[in-house]
Image (tube, helix red, strand yellow):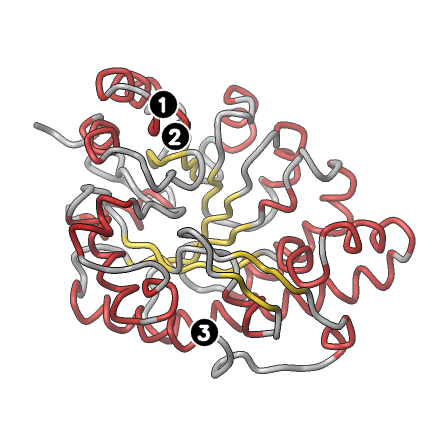
């Protein structure tokens, strides 16, 4: 079983020869950047550079997936938000006029969307069926937070719920549109990044009433395996997340693992949950041991969130070694 088949099977709870170890969130490091000769911010803005460094995460680190893009600002930039290309990860520096959220927009040729689509095509041509190319869209609540600012987004949720629902519908439509473009380009799976819906920021009732219907719409519209990533304390959300329609749920160590397995095991593939601070600061021996303990609780071994850029390659390889036969 090759890397592509193993990961796609695991994400859809089909039989595998062993658990895959993946980089379904962002896994680029400074070591990969140096070895591939790709500069920052070129890997955000140039499709050849994006493809080269994404391939490096597979070839150099040993992770059994290829994931692009490496930030959550692609849709925001396509919708007119100002972007600051700082150290490794772009950030929104200027929000948009809310009237844009009342329009019907095509993002196919806007901002960096064409960069991502071309990088998918390059990677599919390069690796064919060897390894899964996983692309990403931003979840609707997280996208609204970047477009309008999280303070305005949550105040509108509390004071003008109907307006909030309208904005969430717009953001959901953008996510669906972006996902369909990525599938047309050849993406094997789609990750939905929705950190804004974390239990650290939203209540289970808010998730159920306002966010869950949007996640269900997205999952229904995507025909390839879907992975929803929400970092933070999501234990109280799990009873609703199990009904979101996603094939897999990516989480970190802040979510209660026993509760997660009780709600999701056998229903939704569990992706996680090696702590990123352990990967950054731990020893290979400690990381290997922790990764081994994760295997009884996950279907896909993965870092709990974005791997810090200065994470040593030997530490990531220790996580990989926990599942790969020597």
Q: Secondary structure at mark 2?
A: loop
The residue carrying mark 2 is 298
Q: Position of residue 321 (x, y in %)?
A: 18, 28
Residue nearest the viewer, comparing 211 with 96 = 96
Q: CA distance from mark 3 to mark 2?
A: 32 Å
Q: In the image, is 152 to the left or to the right of 307?
A: right
Does residue 218 lie above or below 251 as drawn? below
Q: Which of the numbered marks, if any, corresponds to residue 294?
A: 1
The residue carrying mark 3 is 113
Residue displayed at 30% across by 42% down: 22
> From the image, which quarter does the C terminus lie in?
top left
Of badges 3 and 2, the one in the foreground is 3
First in sequence, mark 3 or 2: give its number: 3
Of badges 1 and 3, the one in the foreground is 3
Residue displayed at 28% across by 60% down: 39
Numbered label tally? 3
Q: Which of the numbered marks, if any, corresponds to residue 128?
A: none
Q: Position of residue 11 (x, y in %)?
A: 37, 45
Q: CA distance from mark 1 to mark 2?
A: 6 Å
Mark 2: few, some, or many residues within 10 Å (few <14, many ≥20)? many
Does residue 66 lie above or below 241 as drawn? below
Q: Residue furthest right?
A: 159
């Amino acid at each position: 079983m090759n890397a592509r088949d193993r990961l796609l099977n695991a994400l859809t709870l089909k039989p595998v020869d062993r658990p895959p170890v993946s980089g379904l969130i962002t896994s680029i490091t400074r070591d990969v950047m140096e070895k591939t000769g790709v500069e920052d911010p070129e890997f955000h803005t140039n499709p050849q550079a994006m493809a080269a460094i994404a391939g490096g995460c597979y070839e150099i680190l040993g992770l059994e997936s290829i994931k692009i893009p490496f930030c959550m600002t692609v849709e925001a930039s396509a919708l007119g938000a100002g972007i600051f290309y700082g150290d490794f990860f772009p950030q929104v520096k200027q929000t948009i006029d809310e009237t844009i959220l009342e329009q019907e927009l095509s993002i196919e040729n806007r901002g960096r969307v064409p960069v991502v689509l071309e990088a998918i095509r390059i990677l599919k041509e390069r690796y064919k069926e060897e390894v899964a190319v996983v692309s990403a869209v931003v979840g609707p609540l997280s996208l609204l937070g970047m477009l309008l600012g999280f303070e305005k987004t949550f105040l509108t949720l509390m004071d003008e719920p109907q307006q909030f629902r309208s904005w969430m519908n717009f953001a959901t439509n953008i996510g669906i549109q972006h996902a369909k473009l990525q599938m047309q380009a050849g993406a094997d799976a789609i990750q939905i990044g929705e950190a804004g819906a974390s239990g650290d920021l939203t209540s289970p009732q808010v998730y159920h009433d306002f966010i869950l219907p949007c996640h269900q719409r997205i999952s229904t519209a995507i025909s390839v395996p879907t992975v929803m990533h929400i970092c933070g304390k999501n234990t109280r959300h799990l009873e609703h997340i199990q009904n979101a329609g996603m094939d897999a749920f990516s989480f970190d160590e802040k979510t209660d693992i026993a509760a997660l397995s009780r709600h999701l095991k056998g229903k939704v593939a569990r992706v996680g949950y090696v702590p990123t601070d352990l990967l950054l600061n731990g020893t290979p021996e400690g990381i290997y041991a922790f990764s081994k303990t994760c295997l009884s609780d996950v279907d896909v071994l993965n870092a709990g969130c974005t791997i810090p850029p200065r994470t040593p390659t030997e530490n990531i390889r220790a996580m990989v070694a926990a599942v790969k036969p020597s």
